[in-house]
Image (tube, rainbow, N blue to C red):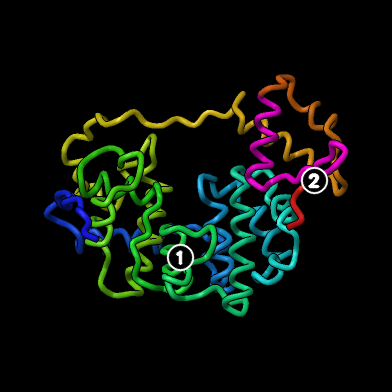
Amino acid sequence: MTSIDTPPGPPAPVAPSLPPELHGPVLAWFDRHARDLPWRRPEAGAWGVMVSEFMLQQTPVVRVLPVYEQWLARWPRPADLAAEAPGEAVRAWGRLGYPRRALRLHAAATAITERHRGDVPRDHGQLLALPGIGEYTAAAVASFAYGQRHAVLDTNVRRVFARAATGVQYPPNATTAAERRLARALLPEDEATASRWAAASMELGALVCTARNEDCGRCPIAERCAWQLAGKPAHDGPPRRGQTYAGTDRQVRGRLLAVLRESTDPVEQAALDAVWDEPMQRTRALDGLVSDGLVEPLEGGLYRLPLS
């Protein structure tokens, strides 16, 4: 059977001074300013790196730190987590948000225990085959835990590359093939340097080249930045997606889960009804939690965190 392939788009524009001239200043800046985060320490190991990557998705470092420390103290290896019910992962996730990540991390730990004798695999393809792990997380674990050469494209890195290399204020709402080509073009050839570059460019976006109130005076590549050289033109692409929380189903789901996390016994419907006045939204949120596998309904109108 034949297939019609979509012709590749044009290559992403790259400023003339890139890529080698960016590496030295950014890496030197990282040496001086990198935060001392527990998942960056040698003792964290690949499992510590993986846990941090799950937790840090759409969640700031300051909120992750206490939960991360408690998680690793309780489950220092994947097998320790896999031995417990998935509902315990949801309970320990606390108020980090997006709790399906807890179920995915539990599923990944179970697969690591069953397929890889309890050790987080080094191979990028094996990482990608684990449940709940996409291209970004596989690349991040391979790079940060094992020092491999991969393009690690999170929101911070995409913003740095958009500004420094393509001269626009913000990257597209979703990662594009052009961004991936650009990230690969900017990778240092040496594996160890490439791994360091991935962490350094991410840190630069988190601390200096931020989404709002960027501090160009502290940026080690400001004089080479295409966006800065163009006069920092304002974003003229699709509207930026805002994140609302108050009054949304996400807020209702969070309140329902909070009741279930605080109880080791099944919870009655009445206790869940008390957390939100609007019955249709409350029912929709609870049904969504059940559908996502985060809540298990029992006979007699009882609910609990999942046991399997």
Q: Decide if residue 257 is on the left or right side of residue 138.
A: right
Q: Which residue is mark 2?
A: 304
Say which element carries label 1. Answer: helix
Residue 55 placed where, x, y %?
57, 53
Q: Depth check: 158 or 113 in front?
A: 113
Which residue is at 66% across, 53% downward? 67
Is residue 14 in view? no
Amino acid type of disc 2? Arg
Q: Decide if residue 150 is on the left or right side of residue 92.
A: left
Which segment did they paint magenta?
281-303
Residue count near mark 1 (Cα–Cα under 10 Å), binned few <14, some 14–19, many ≥20:
some
Q: Depth check: 262 or 283 in front?
A: 283
- In this rendering, the answer to whether 105 lies above or below 176 is below
Locate the C terminus by quadrant: bottom right
- In this rendering, the answer to whether 62 lies above or below 188 is above
User: Does the magenta-highlighted stretch encompass residue 88?
Assistant: no
Quadrant in the picture for residue 38: bottom right
Q: Decide if residue 99 is on the left or right side of residue 140.
A: right
Q: Earlier in the sequence, mark 1 or mark 2?
A: 1
Q: Which residue is mark 1?
A: 128
Which residue is at 33% across, 74% downward? 191
User: Does the magenta-highlighted stretch encompass residue 295?
Assistant: yes
Task: Work out which residue is located at the far front of the displayed protein and give it.
Answer: 1
Which residue is at 72% across, 53% downward? 92
* CA separation in Å, label 1 and label 2: 31 Å
Residue count near mark 2 (Cα–Cα under 10 Å), binned few <14, some 14–19, many ≥20:
many
- In this rendering, the answer to whether 307 lies above or below 168 is below
Q: Decide if residue 77 is on the left or right side of residue 147.
A: right
Say which element carries label 2. Answer: strand
The reply to whether the C-beta atoms of the residues labelled 1 and 2 are less than 8 Å apart is no
